[in-house]
Image (cartoon, coloured by chain):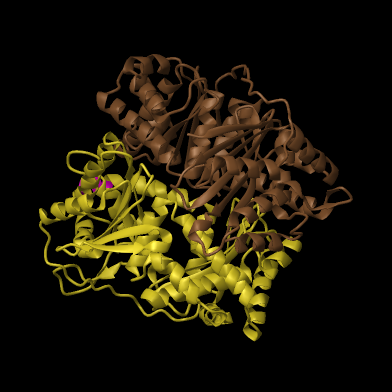
Chain colours: A brown, B yellow
Amino acid sequence: MFEKIKIAEGVNLYIRPTTQFKTISFSFKFRTALTKQSASQRTVLSNVLQHSNAVYKTNAAYRSALDDLYGAVLYFDTGKKGTQHAFYMNAEVVNEQYLAEDQVLDKMMTMMQTALLQPNLQDGVFLDNIVAREKQIVTERIAAVFDDKTRYAQHRLMQILRPQGAASISANGTVQDVATITATSLYETYQKMLSKDTIDIYIVGDVDVREMAARIQSHFAFTDRMPYTQTIEQVAPQPFDYVREQQVMKQGKLHMGFSTPVAFGDDRFPVMQVLNGVFGGYAHSKLFMNVREKESLAYYASSSYLSHYSLLFVTSGIEPENEDKAYQLIQQQLQAICDGQITARELQQTKAQLKNQLREALDVARGQIEVYDQYKSLKEPFTVENWSAKWEAVTAQEISELAAQIKLQAVYFLSGKGE
Amino acid sequence: MEVLHFTQLDEKLYYEKLANGLTVYILPKKGFSKTYATFTTKYGSVDRTFIPIGKEEPITVPDGIAHFLEHKMFEKEDEDVFQKFSEQGASANAFTSFTRTAYLFSSTGRVYDNTKTLLDFVQQPYFTEETVNKEKGIIGQEITMYDDQPSWRLYFGAIENMYHNYPVKIDIAGTIASIDEITAEHLYTCYNTFYHPSNMLLFIIGAVDPQEMMDFVRADQAAKDFPQAQKIERFFDDEPTDVAIKHRTLHMDVQKPKVYVGLKARETSLQGVAMLKHELALDMAMELLFGRTSAFYERLYEAGLVDETYDAGFMLEKGYGFSLIGTDTNEPDAFIQAVKDELQQLEKHIAFTEEEVAREKRRTIGATLRQLNYIESIANQFTRYAFNDMNLFDVVPTLEKITAQDLIDAFQSIQGESQQTSFVILPLEENA
């Protein structure tokens, strides 16, 4: 679906020409190894580049210029996948054929080049006051996880499950590591990112592939670099742990973490996806039907599979006094799958949902980019038909066998304390 | 069936009002594999006092009932509707707002089966005392979940401050006590009054053949019996213009204080093109005066009074409307004062340059075009506009006519000390 063009060693461009959308979308992805330091540095960097640049020296001037360009979107962000940290520049601009003005795309190319390659510098490094302010903002963003109890409970469960390693490192980094950042160290990070990171550039919209490739080449002269390869992290299993904590709140948050023998791209990856769907991925799943609909214990009770860390999670919000009942009921649902209690209907529904979800994701430009980016690392070329066939082939027997290898590793229960 | 062709946007919209009163819109989108359908009733949490269909006297029903009804529509005598949608490869959902209840599905196949399921489940109520009571535990947990969310408490706290009587001040889901009073009979009363096809709108968008789909919906509706349409009478107590409460604080387990300054709108009676123009002008004025490109924001950012959670917006429905300006900040009092000072300055002097207005128009045109990539957004926005006699596709032509003076005039709706309130969430006190 995307045409791949190699720009330099370790720098690839992927273009998908389509008339489906009224805009042109861009996503630049810079990848390196995930550590607490790299995540912290690059997140602060994303904020500093978002603030201003050499042409638009204040945030207001920069945003006004984007508004002038028909409300063009241009933002920097960070994320992680497995053991990899990613720095993003994402952009979207209206296709000028819908406007009474041309050169909108030209201006957007210049805008992206300015935002990424012409930073706001003083004495060769970023401005101290901007760095200080953005460090504070990132620090507060990291701390804000505490205010959202569902996110906080998941964060704590992850720390208990994988105290070391990539799984429990936030893509935003840590408060301690953000604190050590200086204008100079940030500028070094920036230069290293531009010269050493593996770069994937995605473009979706009504564009000519050759012409767009030439524009990218002329605006961003990226040079050769060693391609970064994702490594699989070896994690020693933690002993089973059941942790209860209390805060001033009303609901009980029951989060459970399971280890699985399947990672992204393994032969049994499609089996694991179907298993998760039967267990708790959808509104027809065992968790929703039993914990919510049958027992009325929760408003939400669902499972999710984190393929890059081979982990399966269950999250649910319950009345604190129902903790044990919900805990037993959730385990019974997984046990039922182990025991082969999977109806033909559950299997059919789950497969239909997986296929539908994938096709739906491809109706959004960003979805096309993310799905392709995810699956392109696999050996065989990605197509919807290909993946549908893999899910279709999954049997109840395979799911039961896999379920038997899934082990509950940690439980985290967050609930209210008396005032 | 009528066809509305929006040449500049390259979109064709198909419309028909069916014999039973149902309004149907179909918008085919080339290149999309998904179909998204919303079936919406003009009935939300504010509709709590009304004359039930076939009755003479108004009644007031328990708070949270529109949302409760939304939950219960999914359960039928023989099965759960989610099961059926799942089997047909569709994902289904529903939501209740202050003024609407929407049921929806999206799918990339079996579009007619899914459309049929959507129409059938919303048009065939099934409530018993047993199933109603069972739902109370589930919704109770939904209410508790929101009670623990600081952002929701902040939003609602600000609205409660603004309104004396208007039921927008009541939480959409009600309270655990109010939902406990709900009976199957209540649900039937509300259902029969508000779910008549003449009070509903069906919007289907995406991979769909408009002629075939319209025929399909028309035939489906013709085969079902509905009573004669009646005008729905809703009642609202008089709402004073000024805010009810000037300031409140709430302590929660948060890291950093959160604050909203609320500006209560005086003008809440408009509908149609007048409403569209007013709302666009006020949005543009808010963006220029309090948005991220404003001198105000720049000043507060420099002073460290705002962070990335900063937000300034305006919303309007018939009967209520307000601006909210807020942020997480360690100095909520200083933030509130800064907003009030700015508003006071604006009372003395307010002006917009031609360049600013032109820029705002370009930004809004771009945002509208971007939105046309997202079929869910089109369906939901279109329905909101239609319920207020506006048309989503009139946004760009209406925008072109707006002047700097329109921005100044619209902004007067939220000006004045009497319209201002603030709500603050503070971290728990040490040793409390």
> In the image as oriented, which residue stretches furthest toward the front?
A210
Where residue A347 sits: x, y (%)?
30, 25
Res. B127 in view: no
> In the image as oriented, which residue stretches furthest toward the right?
A123
Q: Nearer the viewer, residue B18 or A341?
A: B18
Where residue A419 sits: x, y (%)?
56, 50
Q: Residue at x 64, y 45 (%)?
A: A215
Q: Is residue B130 magenta?
A: yes
Res. B270 in view: yes
Q: Nearer the viewer, residue B64 or A209?
A: A209
Q: Residue at x 18, y 50 (%)?
A: B216
Q: Is residue B402 left or right of residue B38?
A: right
Provide the residue span drawn in magenta: B129-133
User: In the displayed structure, would residue B177 be above or below residue B239?
Assistant: above
User: In the displayed structure, would residue B223 be above or below residue B1?
Assistant: above
Count of all numbered marks drawn on residues in the image = 0
- Kindly report the secondary structure that dominates the magenta region of the rendered protein: helix
Q: Residue at x 21, y 54 (%)?
A: B214
User: In the displayed structure, would residue A397 be above or below residue A344?
Assistant: above
Where residue A93 sits: x, y (%)?
56, 53
Name the image quarter holding residue A40.
top right
Name the image quarter holding residue B426.
bottom right
Q: Is residue A192 left or right of residue A247?
A: right
Where residue B298 sits: x, y (%)?
71, 65
Q: Is residue A99 magenta?
A: no
